[in-house]
Image (cartoon, rainbow, N blue to C red):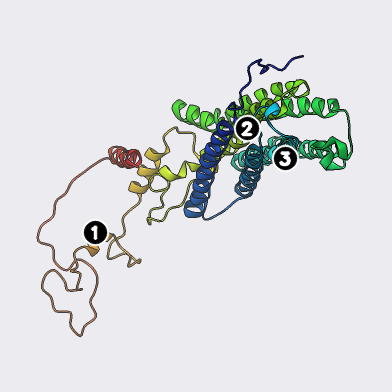
Amino acid sequence: MPTRYANSSLSPQDNRGPLVLQLMWIAAAIAIIVVAARFYVRYTYLNKIRTDDWLMLTSLLCAVLCTSLNTVAVLRGLGRHKQFLDSLQIAEATKWSYLAQPIGILAAAIGRLSVAYLLVSILPRHQKGQRIFLYGIGYSHVLMTFGMIILIYAQCQPINAYWNRELGTCLDPSGRRYFGYFLGSYCSFIDLTLALFPISIFWNLQLKLGLKVFLCVIMGLGVVAMVASIVKTVELGTLSHMKDSTYDSSYILIWYALEMYLVVIAASIPTLKPVSLARSKFTSPQGTDSGFSWRRLFKSRSSTDRSHTDGENKLSKPSRTPFSSNPSYDIRTNMLRHKDNHPVDGGITSGKRRLDGIHKTTEFAVGYADKVSMGKQAHLKSQREFEMV
């Protein structure tokens, strides 16, 4: 079967290397920025780095290492037509591309395991069956990936016979290719499962429809990685028919890189939501950022708008006065005092212990507002502050 890229008029200027490098490193840069923002959010707003974060960082490091090795392969001739390269260039390009393969598939596997841990972290603790399911698909993918790595390294004896057949012998590549089909299909299944799984989590919650859709979409971005995985798996079938290996294999290399980085990016974007929430809706009354936790969604009441109830509850409590047992009365009372601790009525406090409280009242006003309207006003004010962030 002739290669799809066969052409009777090949040119030594034909080189896919620059395109491969641009796509790989642009994706790498985006992934690095997103993961850095993820750790910033976790450390700044949550004060906690979790297991899924460390797994995602490991996945990113493996992906960058894989990209670095493929960069060396491109510099050695990968992406150019084989007939315009000497035997040493072909061997070097094949070697570095070969060494990058196991690291690349491991990066994608660890990234998917991180997604499983992220979903487990937002599940209610009593849903043990779903937790076991997520752990199962995550770790089974990692185990199969190690099986694939063993096949890659065991294909030729010694290993360097893979890029120099004069040094040893290699097994029939069909076994590795079929296992690659199975692993690629399983990766696509995992991506689809992890993308659809949040629907079962969020759809039954007492939330507004728009918020449900938003949460399902942002948590289901892994479906984009599934597309890259499917294309990569389909392209594996062309490997055994490639006659211009250094040129044709560069096309598959692009999809390998996109799969790695799309897993990292798609799994990290949902963790960036606290950037816009931590200073408004999820800020404690004392002004200390309490951070954002997906688990908060499962602690919400049956009402779709909890802020109304919270505003009413706060307003229904009697306010502290200077005559109550707690000296920490309403802050508006303290505003009657001057910043240099002198009473506003000109009283003398020198040498005497000053008693907090209202020392003189010249006028007052009486007003009335029902609790429901005050609660709505507090909710509207909170909503405006939330939209401004």
Disc 2 marks which amino acid? Answer: Glu
Quadrant position of the N terminus in the picture: top right
Give the CA separation, mark 2 to mark 3: 25 Å
Foreground disc of the pair 2, 3: 3
The front one of 161 and 221 is 161
The front one of 347 and 263 is 263
Residue at 58% over, 27% down: 13
Give the CA separation, mark 1 to mark 3: 76 Å
Residue 9, position as x, y percentages in the image = 63, 17
Which badge, 2 or 3, is on the more N-terminal residue? 3
Residue designated by label 1: 332
Residue at 70% over, 22% down: 235
Specify few, some or many for label 3: CA neighbours under 10 Å numbering under 14, 14-19, or 20 or more: many
Disc 3 marks which amino acid? Answer: Glu
The answer to whether mark 1 and mark 3 are in CB contact below 8 A is: no
Which badge, 2 or 1, is on the more N-terminal residue? 2
Q: Is residue 375 shown above or below 176?
A: below
Foreground disc of the pair 1, 3: 3
Residue designated by label 3: 92
Give the CA separation, mark 2 to mark 1: 58 Å
Residue 301, position as x, y percentages in the image = 49, 37
Q: Is residue 184 shown above or below 339?
A: above
Which badge, 1 or 3, is on the more N-terminal residue? 3
Residue at 46% over, 30% down: 211
Residue designated by label 2: 259
